[in-house]
Amino acid sequence: MPDMMNLLDGSERFTLQRVQIMNWGTFNGCHDIPVSPKGHLFVGASGSGKSTLLDAMSSLLSPRASYFNAAARQGEKKGDRNYVSYIRGAWSSEKDTDGRAVSRFLREGPTFSAVSMTFKSNFNREISLLFIGMLPGKSRDESAVKKRYFVITEPFDLIKLKDFGVKGFDIRLVKERFPSAKNFNRFSAYADHFMGLMNIKSAKVLDLLHKAQSAKNMGDINLFFRDFMLGEPQTFAIADNLVENFSKLKSAYETVKDARAQLEVLSEAKTAYDVAQLAKQKRAELEELDAEVEQWRLSYLKRFCEDQLPEAQKQLANVCQLLTNAQNKEENCRNSIDSFKQQLYESGGAALERLKKEKEQVTKDLNKAERSWDRVAPLVELLGFSRPRAVSGWNNICNEARLRKDTAAGALAPLKTQEEDIVFELRVKADEFNKLREEILAMKNTHSNLHPDLLRVRNKVSEALGLSSEELPFAGELMEVKESEAHWQGAVERVLRQFSTSMLVKDRNYGDLARYVDQTHLGTKLVYHRVDSRRLPIKNLSSNCLPNKLNIKPGSWSRWMEDELSQRFDYECVDSTAQFAGSKKAVTPAGQIKHNETRHEKNDRKSVDDRREWVTGFSNELKIQELENRADALSEVIAAKEKAKKEVSQKQQQLNNEISACQRILEIERIIKGSRRTDCSGN
């Protein structure tokens, strides 16, 4: 029933009764919020949607609606909320590959948002304001938003427009569902219409409402009215004009000041310019004089030569006469020498000349023989021969060299074979030594007795899955033979060899491990067991049964290890073949294994007591000591082989040197014989 005071007053007042939103911001779907006439308070944590609801109402009542979330960003010119963020439903922000912030939306395709406010007057008149914002396709551009405003004077329920998007954003649907609805494309026309219906005299009322909503807190009431409700005084414009005029006056003063400074600089420049012009003039005069110097020098030189020419011609004539006299005297001397030679030849000079030539030839032959002996002497000394004094001695040396060459060649082949055998053995031993050294170094970094290849695989898997080595143990690391049962160590190792080298993985890590192993080339064989929380009943085993000869490492794996050993490795440890034959599953100290009634096995490729092949145990100190002892023994073998190789190489070198010396002597013999034949044919 209408308030009687309002009826007597005669004025009509409208109060907000209801707010309805559909697909606005993070409010997905349709939401209906009744508002009490006595007042309504929105409370909630930061980010719960209070500003989103205020911005929804601003889109209907204020032309400044695009300045969304003003209360949260006072003093800022631009925020992160707009029609696109509300229509799309922006709910998070993340960085793209270029490091730029990119919003994430609830509604990606063609979508729309709708907001309505229903007012009711004290005369029972009801007016609903409706805003619909539409975005086609996947656009995120603010300019692509299509806005429609409606004023409806009949009862309005927004839920009746829930199929607006399905109908292709057809505006006519609003008119069909609500015949009183009036459609507006622009906010100004829409505002004029509903302000007229509600008897609102000025648009400043709407602006004041928006400013009041934008206030983050009231604070000082004076500041609130000044900053949010009062317009800017005209004196502000006058003050700005004065500041602008003062800036122009200051600019004029600075211009005059700069002009004076330029005048002073240009005065000094004028003086410098005059000095430069005088210098250029002087330089031109000097260049003109320089161009005439060469011509003057040549003319002066010409006059000097002409003055000296007669005296030079006279001196030339005297020199030519002296030259002619010297040539005549030389000719007379040559004739005298020829005459003296002829007289010497006629008085016995021919025989003297022949003897002289023979002496020269003998001297040449002697020098040649000495040079040949210098080449042969080291070879003869190498073979242990003395210097020959006659041709027969030289022939004996050649015959002995021929015999020694054949003997040395026969002894060389076995030495070559012996050296190849030693080199091969050295390579095998060196490879074995290097592998031992690598294994020792790897084992010193861990307590495990497992082969380094398996430890490397575990390190790769652990690093890839972010797990520790304790979360991926090998079974051999979790058990050891009891000290009192040490004589069974080798036999136990043979039975548990494959199980000991198997990796254990908890059920929670099984999927990650299986995927990694399937996708990765490991380079070696890997067996792993999936360990779940199931508990199997432990068998009742005899005291001589293999599991009872083991200590299990305490921890989260111990129960599973005990279950697995009792179920799979219930072998009786027997000392005699009679007990061995009478047992269902058994193993002897020598390492013979009986798996069942029919299958038996004994693998003697390695000694059963070879500690280097053992992989179980909580510590690897004994195995490291065994490997180091083996490495020391190999080192001694390698040193002995190196020494033997060196001795064989020295023997081969001696024989090769002897063969080379013999070949050189025989080659010189062939050269001498060929030279003699040539001399005989020449004579």
Image (cartoon, rainbow, N blue to C red):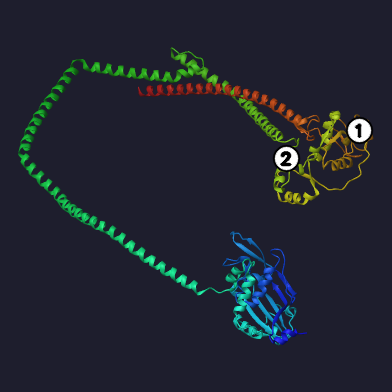
Q: Amino acid at mark 1?
A: Asn
Viewer-nearest residue: 85 or 307: 85
The picture quadrant where one finds residue 522 is top right
**As displayed, is residue 161 above or below residue 595?**
below
- Is 502 displayed left or right of 534 in the figure? left
Viewer-nearest residue: 294 or 208: 208
- The location of residue 407, given as percent across then percent down, is 57, 20
- Mark 1 is surrounded, within 10 Å at the Cα level, by few (under 14), some (14 to 19) or many (20 or more) other residues, namely some
The secondary structure type at the circle numbered 2 is helix
Identify the residue at horizontal 4%, vertical 39% (top origin): 310
- Inspect this view and state whether residue 125 appears: no
Q: How many marks?
A: 2
Work out whether mark 1 precedes mark 2 in sequence or the reverse, and give the earlier one.
2
| Residue pointed to by mark 1 | 544
Identify the residue at horizontal 93%, vertical 35% (top origin): 542
Tag of residue 455? 2
The picture quadrant where one finds residue 135 is bottom right
- The location of residue 354, given as percent across then percent down, is 27, 18
Viewer-nearest residue: 504 or 123: 123
Identify the residue at horizontal 21%, vertical 17% (top origin): 349
Quick one: quadrant of the C terminus? top left
Viewer-nearest residue: 117 or 224: 224
- The location of residue 50, given as percent across then percent down, is 69, 68
- Mark 2 is surrounded, within 10 Å at the Cα level, by few (under 14), some (14 to 19) or many (20 or more) other residues, namely some
**As displayed, is residue 337 above or below residue 616?**
above
**As displayed, is residue 613 above or below residue 387?**
below
